[in-house]
């Protein structure tokens, strides 16, 4: 397959990452703002993949970074939020570091400013194709077209993204043929205007990207905000001071006199009806709420039928204080609105009546054109609503004479607000239509037939008592049997009935996975909790881990399914599904075609070795994966069993960390966690003997793995002479003799990169510090590997004293829960 220009550029960047000096690396910019025709992007982790703490993820296609400086900027590509299961093709504002890479700040996740497919998100392996005819086409993985620019045969020469965040298809002269600025969604950026007839449609919510309940638009005389009802209801209007548009459009930043900013700045029209201005200065801040209405003047402030008073929401009630006609949609979030207990039906007009709510007004009265009837009396207004099935309320407003007012009959009733006539100088009431079911049959009394004599009723009475007693006895026996059966079933099944929560991976039956693995016939490996088998689900190859026995890892299994199923990162092995079928516990992972790292770095086969560039990439991938689970998830996750067997390689030798699913999350404000000893001999950090455990144990294990990779042998190798069995001890001796080059692998490619290999060992020594507080964080390790930071020089080179003690005591401590104080389980080997 021919390499696309973007893929070629990406490989060139990766090549430079690991070949140029750190100084040059720090100056290099990862700026790829343009693309040529006939370029196809597949929505998978091979793109520039960046995950963020809020659960969102971006796969960048084009990025515009600033020369020799980091900061806020714009990129386009695939975006998903939490849970990350579907994607938008979008333009998003991000923050880049001084090298030009997108940074996953905890307080500044990406913000989408434009998207192509709000109503039809796409999935993994969907495609974006800039065709040779100049059409930009977004399609599902099965090839179904979702969206396109419709620019085929319009002389498109290429595509780029501007510094202002405008995605442009341009012709040979550089003139725009199509641009995202002409197709606004819910957001405007600096330099973008809103033309007459164009709209900003709010999202339904942060996680639901479809068009929401309100929109903002430019009409011939100014800016208007409406509800998306039928007909629309206006709640805001603003006419420019000069009463003129600029070429039929409005610059909203100028209209609201917003000061210019050196940072990324955009305004977003949101589902609550507010138009807010956001700015990125290390974190996102709202710098203005430009419509400036009273808090209760927005149509969605208290949802449908809600009443707003000083920002507090309530449901309409009857004069008696009973709220039998209405109930909150959510008792805990009253601002979501209220619903009718008995829905209105046009077939029951005879049961409709009006619930009076005094001293409330409605936002649409701020627009003189909103009143359906003017100069009308209150009674006529109410009757008009009762006769109109689509009317939801009669809203009546008058100044002094109740016979001369304005009447509005909405077909959808949004938030009402309290009215104080002494301040507003008008009176206003709402008559909300409700329905009461007919009660004639329920209230009617059917008289009993007269009794003929008392004696004739005694026999049936006695029989009734006997029958009732028998029924009670049978029910009691049945209840006892039911309790017994339930308890027995619970005892047998125990934890089989796992709850399915949003974001959890797919649940498979045991029979399905048995067939998928051909009755578990092809074993890939063996871990501490079970064996791994190759399988296929549809066209997808998978690795199925079968846990050995229901009594082994039950709690850990559920923890893994719930916590890791929603965690996605390019350098973490993805959990696809699970099985909890009776006593069977299985985990379904993505298949990694090149197996585990140990098969490559410890191989004696000269044709089964890795070149230096691939080694550097693998080490960086491992560091990125650990950095993500340590610092970028909502809670820190300690892996506790980092070793080459738990590093898997895909077809392109991208490295992914596996087997961190049994990790218990560490709260961010928790400095240390007591735990029993876990892990694998040779990779255990010294602090396991003190039971003071943090994620820094993974940093130590990472250091061991790096030394093993560069030296081409295992840390504990009993085939070596006795004095060389322990690699870390050997490393300490070579450091003292200043002969580090002697410990480096004798592989020919490694010799060619001896200086870089020694620097890599020095980074590993930093990670191997006995004092865990002196070890770097994994994010710092990533920066060192990318040339954005330097290795600490004030290091303690006595790195084996405690390691030897651990070897002597391993029989008493290794994987023995009784050896240390009882504690929570963070992770475990596989």
Image: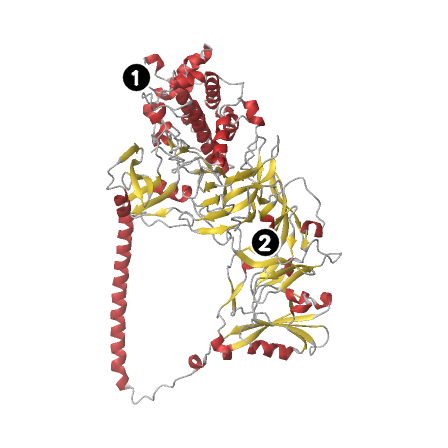
Q: Which mark is residue 719?
A: 1
Residue appearing at x 50%, y 72% in the figure: 344
- Place of residue 54 in the rendered image (x, y in percent of width and height, measured from the top left): 51, 43
Which residue is denoted by mark 2 in the rendering?
270
Label 1 close to label 2 by CB (< 8 Å): no
Secondary structure type for disc 2:
loop
Q: Position of residue 809 (x, y in %)?
A: 35, 22
Mark 1 is surrounded, within 10 Å at the Cα level, by few (under 14), some (14 to 19) or many (20 or more) other residues, namely few
Q: Is residue 663 left or right of residue 171?
A: left
Q: Is 591 displayed left or right of 43 in the figure?
A: left
Numbered badge on residue 57: none
Between tags 1 and 2, which lies in front? 2
Identify which residue, 126 or 274, lies in the foreground. Answer: 126
Instruction: Tell me which corner region of the image, top left, top right, bottom left or bottom right, holds residue 393.
Output: bottom right
Instruction: State the residue in front, 291 or 593.
Output: 593
Is residue 513 visible in this depiction of the protein?
Answer: yes
The quarter of the rendered structure image containing the C terminus is: top left
Point out residue 40 in the picture as x, y percentages from the top left corner. 46, 41
Q: Residue 282, how many percent across, how many down?
A: 61, 38
| Extreme residue toward the top, this view | 737
The quadrant of the picture occupied by the N terminus is top left
Q: Is residue 692 visible?
A: no
Instruction: Look at the picture and state if 216 lies above or below 826.
Output: below
């Amino acid at each position: 397959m021919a390499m696309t220009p973007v893929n070629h550029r990406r490989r060139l960047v990766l090549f430079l990452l690991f070949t140029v000096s750190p100084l040059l690396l720090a100056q290099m910019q990862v700026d790829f703002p343009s693309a040529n025709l006939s370029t196809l992007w597949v929505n998978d982790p091979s793109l520039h993949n960046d995950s963020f703490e809020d659960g969102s993820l971006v796969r960048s296609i084009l990025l515009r970074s600033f020369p020799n400086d980091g900061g806020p900027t714009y990129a386009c590509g695939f975006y998903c939020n939490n849970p990350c299961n579907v994607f938008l093709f979008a333009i998003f504002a991000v923050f880049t570091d001084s090298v030009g890479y997108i940074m996953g700040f905890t307080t500044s996740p990406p913000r989408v400013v434009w998207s192509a497919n709000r109503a039809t998100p796409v999935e993994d392996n969907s495609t974006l194709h800039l065709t040779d005819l100049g059409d930009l086409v977004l399609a599902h993985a099965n090839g179904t077209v979702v969206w396109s620019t419709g620019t085929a045969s319009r002389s498109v020469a290429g595509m780029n993204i501007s510094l202002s965040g405008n995605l442009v298809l341009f012709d040979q002269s550089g003139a725009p043929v199509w641009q995202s600025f002409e197709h606004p969604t819910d957001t405007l950026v600096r330099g973008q205007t809103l033309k007459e007839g164009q709209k900003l449609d709010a999202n339904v919510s942060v996680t639901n990207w479809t068009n929401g309940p309100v929109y903002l638009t430019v009409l011939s005389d100014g800016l208007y905000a409406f509800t998306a009802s039928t007909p629309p209801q206006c709640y805001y209007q603003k006419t420019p001071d000069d009463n003129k548009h600029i070429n039929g459009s409005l610059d909203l930043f100028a209209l609201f006199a917003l000061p210019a900013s050196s940072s990324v700045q955009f305004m977003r029209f949101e589902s609550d009806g507010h138009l807010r201005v956001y700015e990125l200065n290390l974190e996102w801040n709202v710098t203005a709420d430009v419509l400036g209405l009273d808090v209760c003047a927005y149509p969605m402030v208290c949802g449908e039928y809600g009443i707003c008073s000083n920002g507090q929401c309530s449901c309409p009630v009857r004069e008696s204080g009973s709220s039998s006609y209405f109930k909150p949609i959510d008792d805990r979030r009253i601002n979501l609105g209220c619903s009718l207990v008995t829905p209105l039906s046009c077939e029951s007009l005879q049961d409709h009546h009006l619930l009076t709510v005094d001293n409330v007004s409605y936002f649409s009265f701020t627009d003189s054109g909103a009143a359906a009837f003017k100069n009308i009396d209150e009674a006529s207004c109410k009757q008009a609503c009762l006769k109109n099935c689509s009317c939801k309320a009669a809203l009546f407003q008058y100044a002094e004479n109740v016979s001369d007012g304005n009447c509005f009959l909405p077909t959808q009733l949004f938030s009402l607000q309290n009215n104080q006539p002494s301040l507003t100088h008008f009176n206003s009431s709402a008559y909300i239509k409700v329905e009461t079911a007919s009660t004639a049959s329920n209230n009617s009394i059917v008289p009993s037939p007269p009794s003929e004599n008392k004696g004739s009723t005694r026999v049936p009475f006695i029989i009734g008592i006997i029958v009732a007693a028998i029924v009670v006895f049978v029910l009691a026996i049945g209840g006892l049997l039911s309790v017994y059966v339930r308890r027995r079933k619970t005892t047998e099944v125990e934890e089989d009935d796992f709850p399915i929560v949003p974001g959890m991976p797919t649940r498979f039956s045991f029979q399905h996975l048995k067939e998928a693995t051909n009755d578990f016939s092809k074993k890939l490996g063996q871990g501490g909790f079970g064996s791994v088998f190759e399988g296929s689900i549809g066209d997808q190859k998978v690795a199925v881990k079968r846990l050995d026995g229901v009594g082994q890892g039950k709690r850990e299994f559920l923890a893994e399914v719930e916590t890791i199923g929603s965690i996605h990162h390019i350098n973490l092995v993805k959990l696809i599904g699970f099985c909890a079928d009776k006593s069977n516990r299985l985990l379904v992972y993505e298949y990694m075609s090149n197996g585990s790292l140990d098969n490559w770095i410890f191989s004696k086969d000269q044709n089964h070795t890795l070149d230096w560039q691939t080694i550097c990439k693998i080490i960086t991938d491992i560091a990125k994966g650990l950095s993500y689970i340590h610092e970028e998830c909502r809670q820190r996750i300690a892996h506790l069993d980092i070793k080459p067997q738990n590093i898997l390689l895909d077809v392109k030798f991208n490295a992914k960390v596996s087997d961190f699913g049994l990790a218990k999350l560490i709260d961010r404000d928790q400095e240390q966690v007591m735990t029993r000893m876990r892990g694998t001999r040779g990779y255990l950090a010294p602090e396991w003997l003190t039971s003071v455990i943090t994620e820094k144990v993974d940093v130590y294990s990472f250091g061991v793995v790096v030394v093993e990779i560069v030296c081409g042998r295992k840390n504990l190798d009993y085939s070596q002479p006795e004095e060389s069995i322990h690699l870390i001890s050997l490393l300490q001796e070579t450091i003292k003799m200043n002969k580090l080059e002697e410990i480096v692998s004798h592989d020919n490619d490694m010799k060619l990169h001896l200086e870089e290999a020694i620097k890599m060992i020095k980074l590993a020594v930093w990670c191997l510090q006995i004092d865990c507080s002196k070890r770097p964080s994994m994010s710092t390790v990533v920066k060192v590997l990318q040339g954005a930071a330097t290795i600490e020089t004030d290091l303690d080179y006595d790195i084996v004293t405690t390691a030897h003690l651990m070897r002597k005591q391993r029989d008493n401590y290794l994987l023995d829960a009784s050896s240390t104080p009882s504690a929570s389980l963070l992770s475990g080997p596989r």
